[in-house]
Image (cartoon, rainbow, N blue to C red):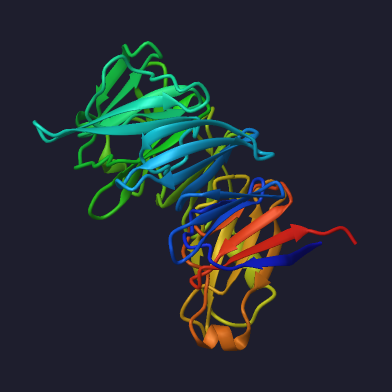
Amino acid sequence: MWKETKVVKNVRHFYSFDARYGVYATTDKDDNSILYISGKEIPIRRAGYIRSYDDKVVVQVDDGASLYDAMLYTKDGELLNIVKKTLSMTGNTNKRYLNTYMRDGANYNDYNNLVDIETGKVIFKEDYLGLRFVFNDMIFSNGDNIIIRYDWDGSILWQHNYEPDFNVTIDLGFRLEGVCGGKLWVKSSVDWHDILLAIDVNTGELLKAFSKSKEDTNHEHCVLHVNEVFLNQENGQVMNVYGCVSVIDSGTLNIVDKYYPKEIFEKDIDERVHYLLANNPYAKYLIYLCIMEEDDTPTCFFIFNTETKQIEFSTRMFTPKERSKGYGITNHYAVQFFDTGYICVHDNGDRLHIFEDVKE
């Protein structure tokens, strides 16, 4: 049974925790932080992002120059390595590989490289402009609607300009969704709708596009209102969440299922609800933040299991007095669940609410 077991004050940032192993950091008024990991309390400089992968935890601390020192710990709190001058960890990239930064003061250029935080090895022989990202042990870059895949020796495996593949203006932007089922999934944002691209990771070929208008491209296309996209690596499903959840099989690129988590939730309530979708890093579970009728901020959430099609857990947070003062869940990045025994929720009062699966 899920119960709220702890409320931690002074968790200043909504990104200074990770629910996989229940790790978090508090920060005082003097910008000194304490890292809480596996029962240990470790003094660190001001905490930034905390993210996990496999059995390890990456903790970024402010270096005083707008960058981060990245500290690699085991899940039990043993410090393994430190990499300096890293950029903040964002997106669903492989957290083992971090972008580092340096500035050429004479030419006003920003240079980057990838570093393996486990070994400290710099991946590319020469620094470069822009950023590179690792998904499923594959390196990609993205800029001006041109995507490049690199080998681990730094050579280019393929590069492709996707503008000629479309009959409308596209903007692949900065974000790549990730790799699933042998495809790189990328979302283009244009003025009036989004387009989801499924790209062959071995060749760069556009295999299929998903959007609300079949006129967008002459390539293979599926009509779909594209919104938020989640990749479930465990079963190879790509989920597009709009009014409903549309499930794309990453192998066949066909829509194989649709379901309506909000309708299941609303069976048990009798008031109007406005929903925000949380950016949960573990895509087996979708998390919906709920703004109830009398509230101005999200004060409720529910976790939906995409395999059982059932609500795993739901709760209304905060006392009526707190809700009247505007307390709520910070934003759509502020709730995490990995199915490891913890649910972590950050609120706009700099508190971290920890729920645990308590055996009775």
Q: How many marks?
A: 0
Up-down: is 17 above or below 8?
above
Establish if 194 lies above or below 14. above
Q: Is residue 184 left or right of residue 308?
A: left
Q: Is residue 123 visible?
A: yes
Between 160 and 218, the residue placed more toward the observer is 160
- Name the residue at 53% across, 57% down: 244
**Residue 315: x percent and y percent?**
67, 70
Spot the residue most to the right: 360
Q: How far across and down, in percent of the image, does residue 40 sit?
A: 68, 48
Could one spot residue 184 in this view of the protein?
A: no
Give the quadrant of residue 209.
top left
The vertical placement of 179 against 299, above or below, is: above
Q: Residue at x 44, y 22 (%)?
A: 138
Q: Nearer the viewer, residue 66 or 166?
A: 66
Name the foreground residue: 149 vs 200. 149
Residue 299's image quarter? bottom right
Residue 272 horizontal/vertical position (percent): 54, 80
Q: Residue at x 52, y 83 (%)?
A: 293
- Residue at the farthest left position: 106
Q: Quadrant of the C terminus?
A: bottom right
User: Which residue is at a point 27% across and 20% down the rendered structure image?
Assistant: 159
Identify the image quadrant of the N terminus.
Answer: bottom right
In percent of width and height, residue 201 lies at: 42, 21
Residue 70 lies, with reference to residue 8, above or below; the image says above
